[in-house]
Image (tube, rainbow, N blue to C red):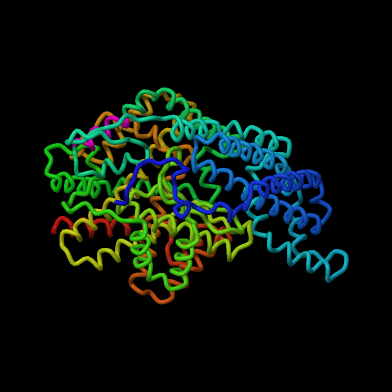
Amino acid sequence: MENYEIMTREQQKVEDTWNMQDLYATEEAFQEDVKTLEGCMEELEGMQGAMAQGPEQLLKILKLYAKTSVTYEKLYVYANQKYHEDTANAKYQQMSGEMQILGTKLSQAASWMEPELLALPEEKLEGYFVAETGDAEDGAAVCRELCGYRRFVDQITRKRVHILDAEAEALMARVGELGQAPSNIFSMFNNADIRFPEVSGADGKRVPLTVGTFVSHLQSPDRTLRKNAFEGFYAVYEQFINTLAATYYANLKQADFFAKEHRYKNALEAALDENAIPVPVYEKLVQAMNERLPLMHRYVKLRKKLLGVEELHMYDVYVPVVEMPEKTYTFDEAKQIVKRGLAPLGEDYLALLQEGFDNRWIDVYENRGKRTGAYSWGAYGTHPYVLLNFHGTLNDVFTLAHEMGHALHSWHSDHAQPYLYAGYRIFVAEVASTCNEALLIHDLLESSTDTEERKYLINYFLDQFKGTMYRQTMFAEFEMITHGIVEKGGMLTAEQICEIYLNLNKKYFGEDMISDPQIAYEWARIPHFYTPFYVYQYSTGFAAAIAISSKILKGEPGIVEKYKKFLSGGSSMDPIDLLKICGVDMSSSDPVHAALDVFEEYLAELETL
């Protein structure tokens, strides 16, 4: 591994950080856009009541709304990415908070649009798209331009029953800021305030324990270090468990409130409707994964056997089960490995990948206060950005491939679609990233000539299935249970939440796993639970990605072109239909079972080896 210690932001080398000047060259330019946005918002508010005047006015409103949204996205992304560089930096804490407040004001300024659009009689609105008002040529031009917004309008009218009147929507926009409070409190606690003790391994040497180093400690061959890291980590969450339970319960309550106020049956239906995903897709996933739990239990049994332990504990879940010299990678090596693995996607894709590597799209290493984990993000009109906390593990190499998958998905969509259709839905967001991972693991297995290395890589791939399909579905089932209790008017305490989570852990991992009492606190550290019903899409996305990557590797005629068409689709089609471009139908549970067939195939090979 590269020489690594937890440095300050100031100690980072410029070339290892993302270039935020590509978004705003100066903070003066940032402030100028704030003023521009405030002017646009005022103008937008002043157009209330104009939609009924004709297609020209509707077009003017939609164009202004798009301009306002583009400007706000750029401001919001910049402020938050600067904040994520060091979450303890008071200046960017404030800037991030100010942009959140500005976002609430934008929601208020635009809150009249949906109700007003829905108040137009359907026949009149339909007439706008075939308008021949005024000068025939001018009317036709307006109509043609307005047709570019047709899907945007249709996505609003599709949810006609869930939109309130203008006064109620304005109130809901104001209340929206309060609804974000549980997520903000958790984020501040988990990223800025929480502190962990140092821990030691069998050699007695003390090492730092952070949110960023936790998983790497659990991957250590030193079982003493794994146990101490596991127990030390969750002991800290246990100290605050009542506060964290109250925060999570508040998040469940706000999700239930907003869903029911918008006339949804529950928060699950509301969350899935954003992406036009039928609720049975979620339910079928949980059901299918429950049907295939014996496969997970078989994997756990093999892990126990290969580790040679009398008892398999939760701190034994991440360590490779195959003995190999610990292999680490420099960031330059990681980039080369990823490029080679993604070669089946063609020269155009590789050239874009290299552009990102060469032009500081990526913030590479951890520093004190930096946001944990990894993500790809950006604003329309500029290149995407990737945040990493690179420690040199194989997992970090895969994270690079994963996040660049997101980044190039965004690049393709941004270049093919107008702003309002460029942002792809969460349901397909994990497909491109996981497809990259599947291609990379295949390349590494293909190029491996050593049996022990092959066993190591198969174990790694099996761990991806375990961590993505099984673990994320367990999270999804946890959300389904806890939100379900609140939906029915129930109350949840820390003790109850921990019991629900512990019982699920026992069900998913089976009898060969000791579900240590500390694992009952794991839910308290998962940021995604503050975006309700998000995580199931990791499982569905993984299944879809395995299907697409298999087609690419088999050389199915035209599949790479179809895949790039999918990447370029943004939200111009419903997510289910976008995947059908590549011949994958997620409205059935077939892709889930097909992915688990691949899991079983590799599991059988590792059992044989």
* Along the viewing direction, whichever of 404 and 155 lies nearer the viewer: 404
Say which of 213 and 515 sits in front. 213
Residue 487 in view (yes/no) = no
Viewer-proximal residue among 549 and 96: 96
From the viewer's side, name the closer residue of 207 and 398. 207
| Whether residue 237 is visible | yes
Where residue 42 appears, x then y in whole percent? 77, 43
Q: Is residue 29 left or right of residue 488?
A: right
Q: Residue furthest bottom?
A: 557
Position of 237 relative to 136 (above/below)? above
229 in magenta:
yes
> Exactly how many numbered labels are in the figure?
0
Identify the residue at the far right of this view: 134
- The structure residue drawn at horizontal position 73% and vertical position 54%, both measured from the top left corner, is 62
Residue 487, image x, y percentages: 49, 32
Magenta: predominant secondary structure element?
A: helix
Quadrant in which the C terminus appears: bottom left
Q: Is residue 279 above or below residue 542?
A: above
Task: Provide the residue span drawn in magenta.
Answer: 224-234
Q: Position of residue 180 (x, y in %)?
A: 56, 34
Compared to 335, does 118 lie above or below?
above
135 in the magenta segment: no
Image spot of residue 44 (x, y percent): 76, 47
